Image (cartoon, grey):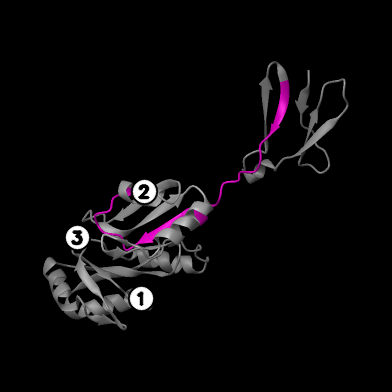
C-alpha cells in the first residue's frame, strides 16, 4: 500500500509522495509553509481501496472588489429583491443589498451588488449605467480601489467623531470638493450643529456626493431644510431633507 509521508527535503517546502513498492517514482508537490495560514494545495482521499493524492488548485476566486458594483441614485422604493431581479437580466447575482438609514429606515438611494464573475459585472455596468429606473438615472460602476494606508486614520477619526441622532438632515448633490468641515460651517448659520459628515465611497476617500448633518432639536432641522434646500454650496444646488 502506498504511504504518504513528509520529510525535510531541500527546499523545505516540498512533500514527497511515495508510490507502491513496484515503483520507485516519487511525486513532489509544492506546499506552502504552515505559517502563512493559507489553504493547503493538496488533500488525500481513498477511492475503491486505492489511496491517491489529489492536488487542489489555487483558489481561482475573483477578488470581491472586481465583482462588487456600486448602484447609485436608485428610487427609495427599490428593495433588495427588486434590485436583484433588475440586475439578473444581465448576469448572475451573488448578493444585492440596498443601504438603509438606521434611524428612519428609509433607503439611502444606493446599493451594492456582488456579481458571480467579473464578466457579469462588466456587462451590468455596460447595460445599466445611465438608464432610468422610476424616473431616476442610476449610476453603476465597480467599487473604488482600497484606501491607501495614510488616508485611513484621518477618515476613521472623521467617522468616529460624527454624533448620530434622530435630529438629522440628508444633504444631497454635494460638490466633490465639499468637506465635512465645510458642511458643518455652512449649516451652523441656521442652527446648533452637533456634527456633520460627508459620506465616502466605501473603502475610499472619494465623496459619494451626499452627507448628513445632526442638530440638537427638530426645530433646527426644520430651519435648516427651509433655509438651505436648493441653496448653492460650492457651485452646486444642494438638496436638504429630513433623514
The region drawn magenta spans 51-80
Secondary structure beneath label 2: helix
Q: Residue furthest bottom?
A: 235
Q: Left of 22 or right of it: where is 84?
A: left
Residue located beneath label 1 in the image: 179
Quarter occupied by the C terminus: bottom left
Q: Position of residue 33 (x, y in %)?
A: 70, 43
How far apart marks 1 and 3 lie (CA) works out to 22 Å
Q: Position of residue 152 (x, y in %)?
A: 47, 65
Q: Position of residue 27 (x, y in %)?
A: 81, 33
Compared with 1, 214 (above or below) is below
- Rendered residue at 45%/46% (across/down): 92
Badge 2 density bin: few <14, some 14–19, many ≥20, Cα 10 Å: many
Residue 21 sits in quarter? top right
Residue located beneath label 3 in the image: 166
Residue located beneath label 2 in the image: 84
Amino acid at each position: 500500500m502506498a504511504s504518504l509521508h513528509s520529510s525535510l527535503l531541500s527546499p523545505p517546502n516540498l512533500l514527497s509522495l511515495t508510490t507502491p513498492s513496484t515503483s520507485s517514482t516519487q511525486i513532489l508537490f509544492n506546499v506552502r509553509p504552515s505559517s502563512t495560514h493559507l489553504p493547503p494545495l493538496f488533500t488525500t482521499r481513498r477511492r475503491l481501496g486505492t489511496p491517491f493524492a489529489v492536488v487542489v488548485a489555487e483558489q481561482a476566486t475573483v477578488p470581491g472588489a472586481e465583482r462588487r458594483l456600486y448602484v447609485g441614485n436608485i428610487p427609495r422604493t427599490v428593495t433588495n429583491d427588486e434590485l436583484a431581479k433588475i440586475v439578473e437580466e444581465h448576469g448572475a447575482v451573488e448578493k444585492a443589498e440596498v443601504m438603509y438609514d438606521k434611524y428612519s429606515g428609509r433607503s439611502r438611494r444606493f446599493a451594492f451588488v456582488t456579481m458571480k464573475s467579473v464578466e457579469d459585472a462588466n456587462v451590468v455596468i455596460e447595460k445599466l449605467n445611465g438608464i432610468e429606473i422610476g424616473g431616476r438615472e442610476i449610476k453603476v460602476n465597480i467599487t473604488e480601489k482600497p484606501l491607501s494606508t495614510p488616508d485611513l486614520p484621518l477618515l476613521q477619526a472623521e467617522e468616529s467623531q460624527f454624533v448620530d441622532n434622530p435630529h438629522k438632515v440628508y444633504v444631497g448633490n454635494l460638490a466633490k470638493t465639499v468637506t465635512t468641515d465645510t458642511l458643518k460651517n455652512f449649516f451652523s448659520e441656521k442652527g446648533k450643529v452637533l456634527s456633520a459628515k460627508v459620506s465616502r465611497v466605501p473603502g475610499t476617500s472619494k465623496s459619494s456626493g451626499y452627507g448628513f448633518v445632526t442638530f440638537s432639536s427638530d426645530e433646527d432641522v426644520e430651519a435648516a431644510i427651509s433655509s438651505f434646500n436648493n441653496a448653492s454650496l460650492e457651485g452646486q444646488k444642494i438638496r436638504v431633507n429630513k433623514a
